[in-house]
Amino acid sequence: MRYHQTDKNMIKHLLKNIIVWILELEARLVLKKYKPKIIAVTGNVGKTSMKDAIYVVLCKAYYVRKSEKSFNSELGVPLTILGCESGWNSPRLWMSNIMEGLALIFLKNHYPKWLILEVGADRPGDIARIAKWLSPDMVVVTHIGEVPVHVEFFKSVKEVVAEKTHLVHALKEGGLLFLNVDDEQVLSMKEYSRGKVFTFGTGEKATMRATNEQILYDKDGKPTGVTFKINYGENSVPVRLQGTAGFSYAYAVLAALLISVSEGFNLLSAVEWIQEYQTPPGRLKIIEGINHTTILDDSYNSSPAALHAALSALAAIETKGRKIAVLGDMMELGKHSTDEHKKAGARVADVCDMLVVVGLRAKTIAEEAHAKKMGKRNILSFDDAREAGTALKDIVSEGDIILVKGSQSMRMERAVEELMAHPEHKRQLLVRQEMEWLER
């Protein structure tokens, strides 16, 4: 039986490689035929938010296609270029994707003028492979952090940075590079640019800078969004984003506005358009909770930098209720895992009134929070996200703010589902609601 399963896995892996090779070849031929302008977005935090924000502005003037969800792999990038969805485990759907690619190549089609591609790396060589055939007109690098997600599969953080830098090397001669000025590892990539470099962030030397960040509240004192000022040259313009408590979205807005200005858009018009931006599910999205509570749904994934940003957002909110963190394991941190979970626990003790942890690694968060004087009666531990959400139903009360975050495999959206005031809207509001995910 074991050998039989091994054979099946080998065949599955071989078929995947064949499909990737075919779709990649088709994608390269499509790019050669239609010659769209390409914006490639990379980094370890905030790629999807960045890509979506750029799309909101550019689609006002151009026919634009963006990566759907988090299509950022050796398979996801070609699928976006071809305009196809994932075939999951269906040979019929994968064959359909291949036929659609052939139609683009051999027939005349109305193809996008711009592509906004999210490019990620789970393992060494992931971006290097894509960079061999993808030549972007613009590259945006979001945030890497001191201990990036997926670092477990790299020899060092420096190797992670080097992997991301492959995309900078792939930038077309004279292309534009947009870098996060607040991340030294990202900013160091400017020396590899063959074109003009723009920077964004909160630092004073940024080409475009965000200042005066504040939380927005409704008449009942519940958080509804964020506001901040955009500073560019002599201009200072306020921006309001509804539905999120994350100031980290300022980076997405800044990059989107910088790109629009580089394309000759009027800044005030671009600011007006960007306020239509809807934050994606599972990324510090504000959701109405049961018992008149507020959920900060950050359940898409987790890493040390992203968790720190989420806890900072929770700390900034004013409420008469409690601040509760529901945190799952942070995966793929390798040798950094214990230290990073400890750091999270220390931060939780400073910010939160109550902590709920899910998973084996997250127990370290609980242990450190208790060591930093958080009372044991305010700490709960579970093995399952849905179980944690169910237990909290009888605990949360009016005015409580509940942050939910964890790595993808922890399925923390299930805790959010249990705590939502309107679970009938889960398909629109939560991550991983496709049937393929729901059946896992």
Image: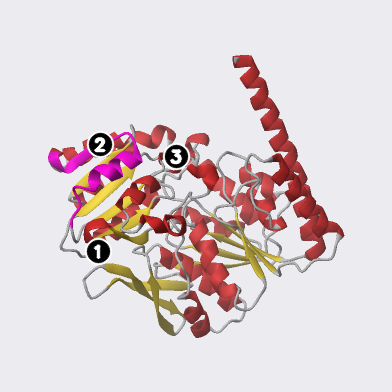
Mark number, residue 415: none
Residues packed near mark 1 inside 10 Å, few (<14), some (14 to 19) or many (20 plus):
some
Amino acid type of the residue that numbered disc 2 sits on in the rendered structure: Ser
Mark number, residue 381: 2
Depth check: 166 or 63 in front? 63
Quarter of the figure with residue 285: bottom left
Query: Does label 2 or label 1 sit earlier along the sequence?
Result: 1
Residue in the image at 43% along x and 33% along y: 334
Residues packed near mark 3 inside 10 Å, few (<14), some (14 to 19) or many (20 plus):
few
Which portion, as a residue range, is magenta? 377-397
Mark 3 and mark 1: span between their CA atoms? 28 Å
Q: Are marks 3 and 1 in contact (CB under 8 Å)?
A: no
Quick check: can you spot residue 198?
Answer: no
Q: Is residue 13 above or below residue 238?
A: above
Depth check: 330 or 6 in front? 6
Q: Name the residue under label 1.
A: 317
Residue 160 x %, y %? 53, 44
Residue in the image at 57% along x and 72% along y: 259
Residue in the image at 71% along x and 31% along y: 14
Q: Name the residue under label 3.
A: 409
Query: Does label 3 or label 2 sit earlier along the sequence?
Result: 2
Query: Does label 3 or label 1 sit earlier along the sequence?
Result: 1
Residue 321 x %, y %? 17, 59
